Amino acid sequence: MTSGNLSLILGAQWGDEGKGKLVDILSESFDIVARATGGANAGHSVYVNMDGETKKFVFHLIPSGILYEHVICVIGNGVVLHVETMLKELANLEEQNFNISGRVLISDRAALLFDYHKIIDGTQEDRKGDKKVGTTKRGIGPCYADKINRRGLRMCDLLNWDAFVEKYRANLAWHQSVYDFEYDAEAELEIMKSNRDRLLEMMVDGAAYLNGALDEGKKVLLEGANACLLDIDHGTYPYVTSSNPTVGGALTGTGMSAKHLGENIGIVKAYMTRVGAGPFPTELDNELGEQIREAGGEFGSTTGRPRRCGWFDVPLTRYSIMLNGFTNLNLTKLDVLDELDEIQIATSYKLNGEKIDRFPALLEELGQVEIEWETMPGWNQSLKDVTSWDDLPENAKKYVLRLEELLGCPMKYIGVGQRRDQLITRA
Ligand code: GDP
Ligand code: IMO
Ligand code: MG
């Protein structure tokens, strides 16, 4: 099961665990990097030393493997694609002299997301009042809803322009009948028309391309977007995104066959964060939470919103490991805990006084869980220059080993900073 050429990198918590950083690092030894789910709600940050300075890239739609010239990037059928956002990302890379020609391919079955989906996203949030999900307002839910309701547009619709325009107008009219908003359809159609040739050049049969490459022995890295606890089926519904960022979505969202599965890496932060509303059992809604937010720079890569912070949640992460079948983990941002005297771990949940080993589906239950805590001593020293496991302070090693024991999954990678070189790989 773990010998295939397809490796996965998936968010194991509530997102922003540091997926982009590992995707960028590992991409060097891959031929193809693919996205399967989500859209521009994702924000994947990569810090690279270039021309004598550290440069920051934030990718929303383009796979984070793009910085290596030999890597082909594929946007899979499961993605909801906002064309202008993608083109801006490409233009930004071109301005910085990256050769991207022929290196970004888009599945012919990928769903197209338009500006009106963003308007509807905002309106739906407003109408929910105090039950807001706290979405990124990137139009994700409304675009997936169109897909599920079988009235959405896909990349392949661009093949026939007249039919495309007809479908576009019908879809917009549908939404305008429900939400009653003004909209400049002609301007958006013009953008699609003027970029049509370029988009058609990028279009491929994604599943055939990826499976063909894997059959030829090429190595493919799947870049998860969003995360397990935001999964529409398995997450903290309704405070979730509208796709399946778990392992099944990686396959469905690209069409890659399960026979190719190899390493499956779960990304876990050394503490927990969440952007947007919804339950968060280990949240530190206090000064300590703010201290961690500042130390970790916990502000959204997509929306700039402050991220809620809390202690590492073992039951939640075990749930994620069960669902995804991770072969190993990347513990990220261990350095953010450098200055804490003590670190807490939520080891288990109790409900009505009884220990439970399931992750509650019902939010009211999740809101009532009592947590059993374990306290670990901090290490009070900077980890940012540590490059090997042996050089980690004893208390940092103890924290990692305790988490590993509680989770029952090996921690192969440990992040100690934002840059490529700030990653410890254990043998
Ligand atoms: P993603 O959405 O999972 O790719 O994560 P984001 O890019 O949204 O947020 C993770 C943030 O943490 C980014 O600013 C990363 O540069 C940063 N980061 C990743 N790994 C580490 C680490 O080990 N240490 C520190 N200090 N920052 C990290
Ligand atoms: P990456 O890939 C963190 C959250 C939003 C909101 C909920 C629904 O960078 O880890 P949506 O716009 O998807 O309808 O919002 O999901 N969310 C994320 N939070 N990181 C992400 O992506 C997220 N993608 C969606 O904040 O709570
Ligand atoms: Mg992010």
Image (cartoon, helix red, strand yellow):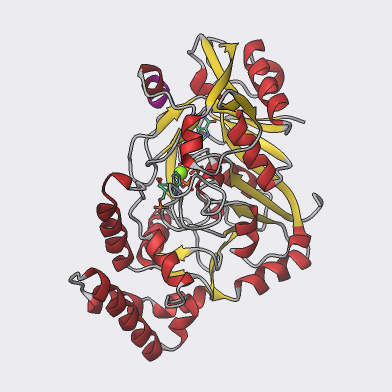
365 is within the stretch colored magenta = no
Which residue sits at x=70%, y=33%?
412
Give x and y (percent) for residue 207: 64, 71
Give x and y (percent) for residue 198: 44, 76
Looking at the picture, does residue 195 appear above or below residue 131?
Answer: below
Picture quadrant of residue 391:
top right
Asked if residue 196 lies left or right of residue 219, the reply is left
Please count the marks in the image: 0
Which sits in the foreground, 359 or 214? 359
Which sits in the foreground, 10 or 122? 122
Q: Main secondary structure of the magenta part?
A: helix
Which residue sits at x=61%, y=29%?
314
Give x and y (percent) for residue 31: 67, 58
Asked if residue 211 lies left or right of residue 173, the reply is right
Give x and y (percent) for residue 239: 43, 47
Which sits in the foreground, 280 or 427? 280
Picture quadrant of residue 383:
top right
Which sits in the foreground, 203 or 278? 278
Which residue sits at x=53%, y=9%?
380
Asked if residue 319 lies left or right of residue 43, the reply is right
The reply to whether residue 415 is in sight is no
Residue range of the region highlighted in magenta in the rendering? 291-295
Looking at the picture, does residue 352 appear above or below residue 86?
Answer: above
The reply to whether residue 109 is in sight is yes
